[in-house]
């Protein structure tokens, strides 16, 4: 049962369906995978009593270590198996419902899993390694010769003469030929600036000043890690209970949150549809941001992170 939904009678739960038999069967298989029995769990109560009584031995600690590792390995395997099966279910649904988007099919199958099997109400999919382009975004201009050296991510790039010239430009004069180079610079540490050990402006400051003109570069960069050298791997915690999306988009989305009006909404929507939830912390306190948070509250990847502005 999805969080925030009313409790359904057992008969009604049994009728929850995607409407596509192949997809429903795969959802059942995913639930069975999550329920698969595993190795015995670590008896922490017994360990606690042994420690209090001074009876802990090396054999006991070795046994606990082996059991704990087996439980973690089993949990990770179940999560991976369920994720793959649910993705197959989404593909089966998309084949029968081509009018849906890939995100809508993934959302539909996870919703059925959660509602038909309330014990899996917190089940989520792994985030996507890349972000799909929002509709209507034009191709990104190529990097101009003047800015090509910035693609090599030079140290202390904020002291580069060409970069400093960009900082001095008015927002409307910032060249499109520099946008992709600025994306790659977001991979560089700016701790010296944050500590006040050096003087300059980070690339995110310029990205914010471009406004919506920067959208094509952000989309191109975040869709192609193989071209721009950012890490697209999906992380996870040791228990397999939480996935971590690539972090390459975080600084760019934080800068985009400063664009005027709702210009950044399509970029944040694309990020959330990929399960990149952490950038939610950068959302501004306004109507379009609140609407996005409400829309993705039941995301198959889990809800977006809450904006830091809510705590101010």
Image: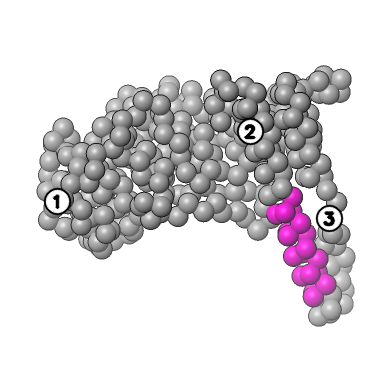
- Taking the image as shown, residue 24 lies to the left or right of residue 206, namely right
Residue 52: percent from left, percent from top = 84, 71
Which numbered disc, 1 or 3, marks the residue closer to the eye?
1
Between 132 and 311, the one lying in front of the other is 132
- Over which residues does the magenta segment extend? 61-78
**Mark 3 secondary-structure assignment:** loop
Q: Residue at x 60, y 44 (%)?
A: 126
**Residue 73 counted in the magenta span:** yes
Between 106 and 49, the one lying in front of the other is 106
Residue 252: percent from left, percent from top = 36, 43
Q: Which mark is residue 38?
A: 3
Say if 214 sits above or below 143 in the image. Answer: above
Tell me the crowding category of disc 2: few under 14, some 14 to 19, or many 20 or more residues within 10 angstroms, Cα based. Answer: some
Q: Residue at x 41, y 30 (%)?
A: 134
**Residue 177 counted in the magenta span:** no
Name which quarter of the figure residue 109 lies in: top right
Q: Which mark is residue 59?
A: none
Which numbered disc, 2 or 3, marks the residue closer to the eye?
2
Q: Is residue 283 visible?
A: no
Which numbered disc, 2 or 1, marks the residue closer to the eye?
2
Considering every residue shown, the one lying at the far bottom of the view is: 58
**Mark 2 secondary-structure assignment:** helix
Q: Which residue is mark 2?
A: 91
Name which quarter of the figure residue 177 lies in: top left
Q: Residue at x 31, y 40 (%)?
A: 217
Give how far apart the Cα atoms at labels 2 and 3 are: 29 Å
Of the residues under marks 2 and 3, which one precedes in the sequence? 3
Give how far apart the Cα atoms at labels 1 and 3 are: 59 Å
């Amino acid at each position: 049962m999805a969080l925030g939904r009313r409790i359904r009678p057992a008969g009604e739960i049994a009728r929850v369906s995607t409407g596509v038999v192949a997809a429903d069967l795969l959802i059942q298989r995913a639930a069975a995978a999550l329920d698969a029995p595993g190795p015995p769990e670590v008896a922490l109560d017994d360990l606690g009593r042994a420690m209090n009584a001074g009876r802990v031995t090396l054999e006991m600690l070795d046994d606990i270590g082996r059991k704990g590792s087996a439980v973690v390995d089993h949990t990770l395997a179940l999560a991976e198996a369920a994720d793959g099966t649910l993705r197959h279910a989404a593909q089966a649904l998309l084949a029968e419902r081509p009018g849906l988007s890939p995100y809508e099919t993934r959302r539909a199958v996870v919703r059925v899993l959660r509602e038909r099997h309330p014990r899996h109400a917190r089940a989520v999919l792994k985030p996507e390694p890349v972000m799909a382009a929002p509709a209507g975004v034009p191709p990104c201009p190529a990097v101009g010769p003047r800015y090509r050296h910035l693609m090599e991510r030079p140290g202390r790039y904020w002291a580069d003469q060409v970069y400093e010239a960009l900082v001095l430009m008015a927002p409307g004069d910032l060249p499109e030929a520099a946008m992709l180079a600025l994306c790659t610079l977001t991979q560089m540490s700016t701790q010296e600036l944050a500590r006040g050990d050096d003087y300059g402006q980070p690339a995110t400051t310029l990205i914010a000043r471009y406004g919506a003109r920067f959208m094509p570069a952000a989309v191109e960069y975040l869709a192609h890690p193989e071209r721009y050298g950012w890490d697209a791997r999906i992380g996870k915690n040791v228990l397999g209970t939480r996935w971590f999306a690539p972090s390459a988009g975080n600084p760019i989305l934080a800068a985009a949150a400063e664009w005027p009006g709702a210009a950044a909404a399509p970029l944040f929507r694309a990020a959330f549809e990929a399960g990149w939830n952490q950038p939610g912390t950068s959302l501004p306190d306004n109507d379009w941001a609140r609407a996005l948070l409400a829309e993705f509250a039941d995301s198959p990847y889990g809800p977006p992170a809450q904006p830091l502005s809510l705590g101010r």
